[in-house]
Amino acid sequence: MGKPVKQCGISSSRPGKEALFALPKDFKNALSNCRTQAEKDPAKDVTYLWIAVSGESFGRAGQEKGGPAALSVEDWLNVVDESASLGANWVVFTLTTRLSQFSEIWTICQWAQDTHGMTVGLHLGVDEVTEEDMQHLLSLNLDKLRLLVRSESIEKLAFLESRGVTLWTANPQPNGAKPNCQGPARMIYVNAEGNLYTCGLVEGKSDYLMGSVLHDRLKHVMKSSRVKHCVEEDLHRVAPACDGCPALIANYFSTNL
Ligand code: SF4
């Protein structure tokens, strides 16, 4: 399968590298805490790639909505390639809305499975799967596919299992608990605009911005001592932003990985 042709331009509104170089004292202390924590539990290779998908994730979709062009499918495939080269064997896509709104997602899922042998998690923000979605799902390697939905939606979508699709709970832990997760050190988290954050829980917090897939090499970001590879203790509680996190889910479904 060849990579699709690049489809669109790139937004110029993303934070650049310079945002990473101002290191106030508090932030330095936080980095130091994270580093101490990481030294106690040294990060192994990257294992997980987690991508948040919204209407702005793909250039065409963003432009149709009158917003800036975001990453092209080609850009996302490059993210998958680079993550796989670092060891990622799992990719989870967290979709903010209906699966059917993201036709590009199937190309990326298939590429991850066929080219890199990755297991794909589709984390549905809306618990609806149309017959058309179903046909796309069935065209993937079902042994390497997991559908992740919140626990209250499992019953509604249980029929998918009779068609061979494995359903997992996207929120295996109650909110407010300390996450029983593997932490973000082995995970690459990319938001819909291509910005890299320590993990989903801290997306949007400037202290946890690690860079951009458009400007930075993932291997440099993941090894950089200038960015946080863990979440500070005071924030480290399960929240809806942890839903679908592969570093969390892996601890609950490891026998099936
Ligand atoms: S998103 Fe939540 S569960 Fe995942 S690594 Fe971050 S704190 Fe842990």
Image (cartoon, grey):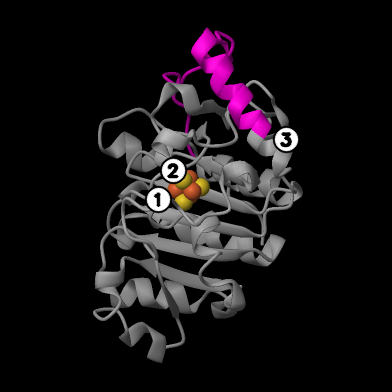
Residue that mark 3 sits on: 219
The image quadrant that residue 158 belongs to is bottom left
Q: Which mark is residue 200?
A: 2
x%, y% of residue 171? 37, 62
**Residue at mark 1 to residue at mark 3: CA–CA distance:** 24 Å
The reply to whether callout 1 and callout 3 are in contact (CB within 8 Å) is no
**Mark 2: amino acid:** Gly
Quadrant in the picture for the C terminus: bottom right
Q: Secondary structure at mark 3?
A: helix
**Mark 3: amino acid:** Lys
**Upstream in the sequence, badge 3 or badge 2?**
2
x%, y% of residue 123? 40, 61
Q: Secondary structure at mark 2?
A: helix
Whether residue 254 is in magenta: the answer is: no
Quadrant in the picture for the N terminus: bottom right
The reply to whether callout 1 and callout 2 are in contact (CB within 8 Å) is yes
Residue lying at 58% horizontally and 29% vertically, measured from the top left: 228
x%, y% of residue 55? 32, 43
State whether label 2 is within 8 Å of ligand 1: yes
Whether residue 11 is in magenta: the answer is: yes
Please indicate whether residue 113 sits to the left or right of residue 150 in the image: right
Q: Secondary structure at mark 1?
A: helix
State whether label 1 is within 8 Å of ligand 1: yes
Q: Residues within 10 Å of mark 1 (few under 14, many from 20)?
A: many
Residue that mark 1 sits on: 242
- Does 135 appear above or below 191? below
**Mark 1: amino acid:** Cys
The stretch of residues the image draws in magenta is 7-36
- Does 86 appear above or below 92? above
Please indicate whether residue 124 sits to the left or right of residue 44 in the image: left
